[in-house]
Image (spheres, grey):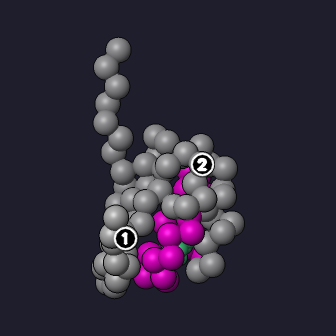
Amino acid sequence: MKKSNPNPVVQTAKTGIEISIIKEFCKGCGICVEFCPKDVLALGSDLKTNCINIEACNGDALCELRCPDFAIFVKNPKKKAIKK
Ligand code: SF4
């Protein structure tokens, strides 16, 4: 059976910060919700993480760093890429 590519739900704040949530990967553990210092995330009725207040996001990516299933990604235009 052919697997389909993940289809993230993407929201972008006025600051340019972008949060992508891959619902297919989210198991609803709530770690990202608990660690978000700005109450940006919440578990929805689908028992998956939802972005409920994108404008409050500070782009620290704590949610992305802690997600054990790589289900959430944060793009912050103010953070510089690490040079290798
Ligand atoms: S980047 Fe930080 S403030 Fe934004 S949703 Fe993730 S944990 Fe919350």
- Residue mark closest to the camera, 1 vs 2: 1
Q: Secondary structure at mark 2?
A: loop
Q: What residue span does the magenta drawing correspond to?
A: 39-63
Q: Is residue 1 left or right of residue 67?
A: left
Q: Quadrant of the C terminus?
A: bottom left
Point 48% across, 82% down: residue: 58
Task: Give residue 31's mark.
Answer: none
Q: Residue furthest front?
A: 84
Q: Say the numbered circle drawn on residue 68.
A: 2
Please name the residue shown 46% across and 77% down the image.
59
Q: Secondary structure at mark 1?
A: loop
Q: Amino acid at mark 1?
A: Ile
Against 26, residue 9 (above or below) is below
Give coordinates of residue 57: x percent, y percent.
48, 79
Is the distance from the Cβ of mark 1 to the nearest ligand 1 atom less than 8 Å?
Answer: no
Say above or below: 15 vs 46.
below
Residue 8: x and y in percent read 36, 51
The question of residue 77 being in magenta is answered with no
* Percent coordinates x, y for residue 45 in the rendering: 59, 52
Is disc 2 surrounded by few (<14), some (14 to 19) or many (20+) residues within 10 Å? Answer: some
Q: Residue furthest top?
A: 1
Residue beneath disc 1? 82
Q: Is residue 11 visible?
A: no
